[in-house]
Image: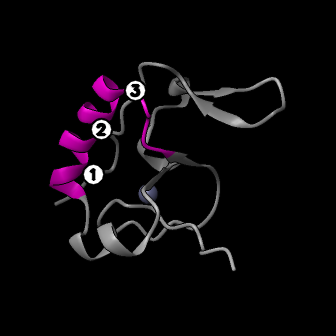
Amino acid sequence: MRRKKSCWVKDCANKQGSFFEIPCDPKRRQIWLDILARFVDPSKMYLVQPLVCENHFRNEDILKSRSGKNVLSRTAVPHLYLVI
Ligand SMILES: [Zn+2]
């Protein structure tokens, strides 16, 4: 059974739209984790797959892949609507 997608960001209840995985590239991954460490709900860190929903990115960071999927630009980092 597939788990429902859930955004890692604290107090974000978004269940729709695109969700993005944390990048595999070690440098970008660390940047993401540094940001998310301040905003992630600790209870979510163990329960759900690490995904960040599209609400936390600027429009220009979200690109269309050839197959029509939403993908992030190489420089995108989550930074919108992050609340403590
Ligand atoms: Zn979210």
User: Which residue occupies 34% across, 59% down?
Assistant: 9
| N-terminal-most mark, 3 or 2 | 3
| N-terminal-most mark, 1 or 2 | 2
x then y, percent, for residue 29 = 33, 34
Locate the C terminus and report the quarter of the image it occupies.
Answer: bottom left
Element type at mark 3: loop
Q: CA distance from mark 1 to mark 3?
A: 23 Å
Depicted 10 relative to depicted 76: above or below: below
Q: Label 1 belongs to which residue?
A: 82
Tag 2: residue type? Trp
Judged by its main secondary structure, the magenta piece is: helix
User: Which residue occupies 72% across, 27% down?
Assistant: 64
Q: Label 2 belongs to which residue?
A: 32
Element type at mark 1: loop
Locate the N terminus and report the quarter of the image it occupies.
Answer: bottom right
Q: Would residue 50 appear left or right of 79 to someone viewing this image?
A: right
